[in-house]
Image (cartoon, grey):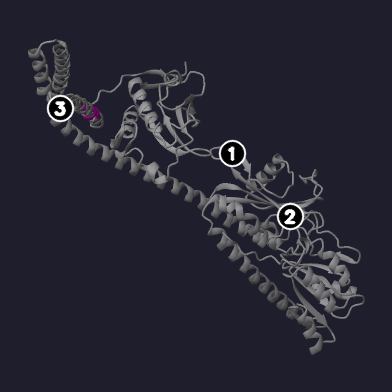
C-alpha cells in the first residue's frame, strides 16, 4: 500500500519541526533573547491538560526596541498567550533552533536583518508558523514584499492591542485548520490499513507526516500478560528495553502524554548521546491500555511543542483504534477460516457418509455373488490345471507310442495328438491365465468392499491403548518394507492413546500414497522423512515428502474418495479410498490429519494424536 507523505521534503528534519517546546523550563533564548512573564517555568513533564488552559498560544515578538517588546509582553493576556521576545532577526532564528511558536510578530525596520529577511528565514525554518509584520512605515510595496516571502498579514504601529489580538487569533485558527488536513489524511491512511503488519509497516512515515522525529518506538502488550513488547525498528539506535518500558508505563499509568528532555533530572536516555527529547503517548482502547508510542528527537532539533503534543494525542487515539481494528480483523479472518475448515470437514463427512451408505448396500449385495463367483473361478483354475496335466500326460503317451516299431502304436499316437490340435496347449494356458486374472479381480473387488465397509462404519474399531509412536514408526525403517527409501528420525519415546491397528493402517495408506509420487522410485530419489514430536501439548507425527507438490485446491480435496492412476498394479485407473480411509480411521480415534506445504518444498502430512502421559 502506498502512502502519500506530506512532510516538507526540501527542509532538514530539524528545520521541518512544528511549533514550540516542552522542557523543564522554557529556556532563555540565545544572546539577545529573553523569556517573558508568560513563559512556562514548570517541570519537564507536562501533560496536555496542564498545558492547554493557560498560555496555550505561543507568540514570538521580534523587535529591536526593548520598550516595544516589554509592552507587548504585558499587553497580551497571559491566560491566552505565552510571549517570548527576541531583539532581532538573527536572535529569532537562533531561538527557533531550540523551540517552535504558533505566531511570530516582527518589526519591519530593524538593524542587521530587516523584517522581509526575517520573514523569509523564519518561514524557511518553520513553514507552519504564521508571521505578522509590524511597521510604522507601511506601504503597498513593503506589504507585498512581506506577503511574497510568506507573511500572514501586517499591522501598523503603534499597536492596537485588540486588533493585534484579533489578528493573532485569525492566524492561529488558519494554522490549526491547515494542520487538520495532514491529520485527516494520515487518519484516513491509518484506518485503511487492515492488518497489524500493515500498520507497523507504515507507522513511521505516517507519524513523520504529523510530528517530525528522528526515531520512534512502539510498545504493545503481549497477549495474556502485562509485559510490553517492543516492535522492531530500523533506525539503528540501541535503546534500553527497560528504559523504554518504564517511560511507557509512566504514560500508560497517567493516561496522558509524557515529555522529557536531555536537561531533565529524570532523562532516561543518558547513554545515547544523539537524543535530546522524548515524547510518550499512551494508546488506549476504552479503559484498557493498548500500548505506547514513543517519539524521539536528536540533539540540536527543536523540542516537542504543545501543538505537536495535541496532534500526537489525536494520532495516538487513531493509532490505538487502527491496532484494535487490525486485531479484530485478524480474529474475524481466523474465525472465517475456522468456519471454512469446519464447513469443509462437514462436507467431507457428508461425502463419506454418502459413500458409506452406498458401501453398505454394495457390500450386502455383492458379498454372496462374489463368494460364489470366486469359488467357481477357483474351480475353473483347478480344472485348467487338471486339463493341463492331462494334456501333458497325453503328449508323453503319444511320444512313447511313436517310438515303438509298431504301425498300430504310431497311428494311435497320431490320433492322440490330432484330437488335441495344435493350439491345445495355448488354449489351456489362456484358460489358466483367465482364471487367475478373474480370481485377482475378485480379490481386488473384495478389497474394495472391505474399504467400503470401513467407510460405512462396519469395520471393527481397534482397541485404544498406550502406544509408543516412535517404536511403531520403526516398522517402516527396514529396507524392502516400502518401494521407496524412508528415513525415521530418532527420538525419545513418545506415547499416545490410540488404536494401534487403526494407526498402523492409516500410516500404511499414507505411505502407499506417497510411494506413488512421480519420481519417487527413481534412483537417487530423496527419502520420505518421518518425525515425531509434540505440538500444542499433543503427540504429533510428520511425514515429509520433498517430491510431492500440491496446490491449495488439491490439498483441500486430498481426503475425498477419488479416481487415480494405479501404476503399481499395472491398471490404468482405480478408485482411491486410501487417504479417505486414513482420515476416517484417524478421526474416529480423536486424531487430526492435515496437509501443509513443506518449509522449503514438497508436502508435509501432519497427524496430531490424542495425548497421554510420558513414560
How would you rate the neighbour count of disc 2 (Cα within 10 Å): few for under 14, some for 14-19, many for 20 or more?
some
Along the viewing direction, whichever of 574 and 135 lies nearer the viewer: 574
Q: CA distance from mark 2 to mark 1?
A: 28 Å
166 to 3, vertically: above or below: below
Mark closest to the chain's N terminus, 1 or 3 = 1
Mark 2 = which residue?
214
Assign the N terminus to one quadrant of the image.
bottom right
- The quarter holding residue 36 reads bottom right
Mark closest to the chain's N terminus, 2 or 1 = 2
Mark 3 = which residue?
370
Residue 478, how many percent across, how many down? 45, 19
In the picture, measured across the screen, residue 150 lies left or right of residue 440, that is: right
How would you rate the neighbour count of disc 1 (Cα within 10 Å): few for under 14, some for 14-19, many for 20 or more?
few
Magenta segment: 442-447
Along the viewing direction, whichever of 362 and 201 lies nearer the viewer: 362
Residue 144, how many percent across, how many down? 77, 85
Mark 1 = which residue?
226
Amino acid at each position: 500500500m502506498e502512502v502519500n507523505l506530506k512532510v516538507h521534503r526540501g527542509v532538514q528534519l530539524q528545520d521541518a519541526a512544528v511549533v514550540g517546546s516542552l522542557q523543564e523550563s522554557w529556556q532563555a533564548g540565545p544572546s539577545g533573547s529573553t523569556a517573558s512573564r508568560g513563559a512556562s517555568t514548570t517541570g519537564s513533564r507536562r501533560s496536555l491538560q496542564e498545558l492547554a488552559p493557560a498560555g496555550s498560544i505561543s507568540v514570538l515578538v521580534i523587535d529591536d526596541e526593548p520598550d516595544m517588546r516589554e509592552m507587548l509582553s504585558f499587553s497580551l493576556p497571559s491566560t491566552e498567550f505565552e510571549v517570548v521576545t527576541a531583539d532581532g532577526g538573527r536572535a529569532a532564528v537562533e531561538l527557533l533552533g531550540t523551540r517552535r511558536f504558533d505566531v511570530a510578530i516582527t518589526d519591519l525596520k530593524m538593524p542587521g536583518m530587516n523584517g522581509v529577511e526575517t520573514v523569509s528565514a523564519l518561514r524557511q525554518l518553520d513553514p507552519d508558523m504564521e508571521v505578522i509584520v509590524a511597521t510604522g512605515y507601511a506601504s503597498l510595496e513593503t506589504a507585498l514584499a512581506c506577503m511574497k516571502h510568506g507573511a500572514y498579514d501586517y499591522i501598523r504601529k503603534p499597536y492596537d492591542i485588540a486588533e493585534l489580538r484579533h489578528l493573532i487569533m485569525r492566524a492561529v485558527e488558519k494554522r490549526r485548520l491547515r494542520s487538520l488536513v495532514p491529520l485527516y489524511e494520515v487518519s484516513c491512511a491509518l484506518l485503511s490499513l487492515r492488518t497489524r503488519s500493515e500498520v507497523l509497516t507504515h507507522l513511521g512515515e505516517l507519524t513523520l507526516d504529523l510530528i517530525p522525529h528522528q526515531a520512534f518506538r512502539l510498545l504493545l502488550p503481549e497477549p495474556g500478560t502485562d509485559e510490553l513488547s517492543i516492535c522492531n525498528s530500523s533506525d539503528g539506535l540501541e535503546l534500553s528495553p527497560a528504559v523504554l518500558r518504564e517511560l511507557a508505563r509512566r504514560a500508560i499509568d497517567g493516561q496522558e502524554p509524557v515529555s522529557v528532555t536531555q536537561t531533565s533530572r529524570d532523562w532516561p536516555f543518558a547513554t545515547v548521546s544523539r537524543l535530546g527529547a522524548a515524547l510518550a503517548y499512551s494508546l488506549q482502547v476504552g479503559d484498557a491500555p493498548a500500548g505506547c508510542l514513543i517519539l524521539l528527537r536528536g540533539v540540536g532539533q527543536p523540542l516537542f511543542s504543545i501543538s505537536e503534543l495535541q496532534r500526537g494525542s489525536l494520532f495516538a487515539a487513531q493509532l490505538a483504534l487502527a491496532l484494535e481494528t487490525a486485531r479484530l480483523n485478524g480474529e474475524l479472518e481466523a474465525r472465517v477460516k475456522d468456519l471454512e475448515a469446519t464447513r469443509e470437514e462437514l462436507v467431507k463427512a457428508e461425502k463419506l457418509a454418502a459413500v458409506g451408505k452406498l458401501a453398505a448396500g454394495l457390500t450386502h449385495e455383492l458379498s454372496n455373488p462374489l463368494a460364489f463367483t470366486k469359488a467357481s473361478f477357483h474351480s475353473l483354475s483347478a480344472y485348467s490345471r487338471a486339463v493341463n496335466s492331462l494334456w501333458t500326460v497325453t503328449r508323453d503317451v503319444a511320444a512313447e507310442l511313436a517310438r515303438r516299431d509298431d504301425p498300430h502304436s504310431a497311428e494311435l499316437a497320431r490320433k492322440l495328438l490330432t484330437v488335441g490340435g495344435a493350439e491345445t496347449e495355448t488354449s489351456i494356458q489362456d484358460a489358466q491365465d483367465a482364471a487367475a486374472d478373474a480370481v485377482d479381480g475378485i480379490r481386488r473387488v473384495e478389497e474394495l468392499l472391505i474399504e467400503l465397509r470401513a467407510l460405512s462404519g462396519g469395520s471393527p474399531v481397534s482397541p485404544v491403548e498406550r502406544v509408543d509412536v516412535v517404536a511403531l514408526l520403526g516398522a517402516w525403517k527396514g529396507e524392502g518394507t516400502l518401494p521407496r527409501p524412508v528415513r525415521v528420525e530418532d527420538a525419545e519415546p513418545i506415547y499416545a492413546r490410540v488404536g494401534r491397528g487403526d494407526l498402523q493402517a492409516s500410516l500404511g495408506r499414507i505411505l502407499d500414497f506417497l510411494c506413488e509420487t512421480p519420481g519417487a522410485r527413481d534412483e537417487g530419489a530423496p527419502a520420505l522423512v518421518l518425525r515425531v514430536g509434540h505440538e500444542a501439548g499433543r503427540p504429533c507425527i510428520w511425514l515429509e515428502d520433498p517430491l510431492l507438490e500440491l496446490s491449495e485446491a488439491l490439498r483441500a480435496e486430498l481426503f475425498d474418495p477419488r479416481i487415480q492412476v494405479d501404476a503399481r498394479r499395472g491398471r490404468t485407473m482405480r478408485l482411491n479410498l486410501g487417504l479417505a480411509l486414513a482420515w476416517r480411521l484417524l478421526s474416529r480415534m480423536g486424531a487430526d490429519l492435515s496437509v501443509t506445504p513443506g518449509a522449503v518444498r514438497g508436502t508435509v502430512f501432519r497427524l496430531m494424536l490424542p495425548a497421554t502421559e510420558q513414560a
